[in-house]
């Protein structure tokens, strides 16, 4: 007779060690850790707030200064333009990658492979010095045609498109093939199938990584400071090169990045909730 058969005959009280142990101790231990974590967080926060080396009065003076706000505006503008152009080009590349045409698939794959392999800083420096390879484009001097801001838009957009293409392609592939076949059976046109059936379902998979890419692009624009584009980081650098107040000015840039990324995170949450309507992931 097996152990469990004997237990059933003798009753549960015969084998008390087989009873499931309550998990209250585990939960109590986690509750006991909460005050320790809060104390450590309080100590860390107090060390930042009361540390005179941060010079919070200087942070307050420059937080809304004209030069910093101009840099912030250029950062936001670059983020919006690069994200829009990057996803527009990325959508085309994703369509090429899913095409039945082998040439289009090869071109899309080659583009994605190339621009995902090159560091973004190398790309920016390459486009910034493109005049060494092509002194003139369409009869216009390259130096006059490609200024620092234009180089930043071109370099960041080409880099963004390579990643956006994979995000869009993954979202389209996540849609069940049966949905498309059902739409075809109903006689819907290709445009209506994509707009009414494929896109709303694909957006559930596209929005989360796209939101991460948007936030990454916002922070990634700080790299354009190496080519003298006066974004948020470059603006604070100009100030602390003059005043030697490095840490307070870096805190100004950090606080603005935190504020903007937090706002974008809230927006991403509501967009995700909109496209998750009717699914179990709505909660």
Image (cartoon, rainbow, N blue to C red):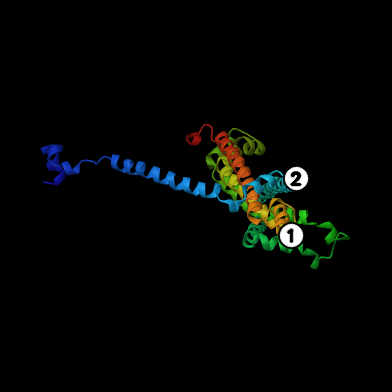
Q: Which residue is mark 1?
A: 227
SS at circle 1: helix
Inter-mark Cα distance, 2 to 1:
21 Å
Q: Nearer the viewer, mark 2 or mark 1?
A: 2
- Number of residue marks: 2
Kindly check if marks 2 and 1 are in contact, taking CB atoms under 8 A apart as contact. no
Q: Percent position (x, y) of residue 104?
A: 67, 55
The numbered dot on residue 187 is none
Vertical placement of 140 versus 217: above or below? Answer: below
Residue 173 in view: yes
Position in image of residue 75 (x %, y %): 70, 48
Q: Position of residue 217 (x, y in %)?
A: 64, 50
Q: Can you see residue 94?
A: no
Tag 2 residue: 66
- Using the image, determine if residue 15 lies above or below residue 139: above
Nearer-the-camera pick, 225 or 8: 225
Task: Give coordinates of residue 144: x percent, y percent.
Answer: 85, 58
Instruction: Give the residue drawn at x 58%, y 44%.
Output: 206
Q: Residue at x 61, y 41 (%)?
A: 264
Residue situated in front as seen by the camera: 44 or 37 = 44
Q: How busy is the neighbourhood of tag 2: few (under 14 within 10 Å), some, or many (20 plus)? A: few
Q: Residue at x 66, y 52 (%)?
A: 249
Q: Is residue 31 above or below residue 132?
A: above
2 or 1: tag closer to the N-terminus? 2
Mark 1 nearby-residue class (10 Å; few <14, some 14–19, many ≥20): some
In the image: residue 219, left or right of residue 30: right
Q: Secondary structure at mark 2?
A: helix
* Viewer-closest of 48 and 95: 48
């Amino acid at each position: 007779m097996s152990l469990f058969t004997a237990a059933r005959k003798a009753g549960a009280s015969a084998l008390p060690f087989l009873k499931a142990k309550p998990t209250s101790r585990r939960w109590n231990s986690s509750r006991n850790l909460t005050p320790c974590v809060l104390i450590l967080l309080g100590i860390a926060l107090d060390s930042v707030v009361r540390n005179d080396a941060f010079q919070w009065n200087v942070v307050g003076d420059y937080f809304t200064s004209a030069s910093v706000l101009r840099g912030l505006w250029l950062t936001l503008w670059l983020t919006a333009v690069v994200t829009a152009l990057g996803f527009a080009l990325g959508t085309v590349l994703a369509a090429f990658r899913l095409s039945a045409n082998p040439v289009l698939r090869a071109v899309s794959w080659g583009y994605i492979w190339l621009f995902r392999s090159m560091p973004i800083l190398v790309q920016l420096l390459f486009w910034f010095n493109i005049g060494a390879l092509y002194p003139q484009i369409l009869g216009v001097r390259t130096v006059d045609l490609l200024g620092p801001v234009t180089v930043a838009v071109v370099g960041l957009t080409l880099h963004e498109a390579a990643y956006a293409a994979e995000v869009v392609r993954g979202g389209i592939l996540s849609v069940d093939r049966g949905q498309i076949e059902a739409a075809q059976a109903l006689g819907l046109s290709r445009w209506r199938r994509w707009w009414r059936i494929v896109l709303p379902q694909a957006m559930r998979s596209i929005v989360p990584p796209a939101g991460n890419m948007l936030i990454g692009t916002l922070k990634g624009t700080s790299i354009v400071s190496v080519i003298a584009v006066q974004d948020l980081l470059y603006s604070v650098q100009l100030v602390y090169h003059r005043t030697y107040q490095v840490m307070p000015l870096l805190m100004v840039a950090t606080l603005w990045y935190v504020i903007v990324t937090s706002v974008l995170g809230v927006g991403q949450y509501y967009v995700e909730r909109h496209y998750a309507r009717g699914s179990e992931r709505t909660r």
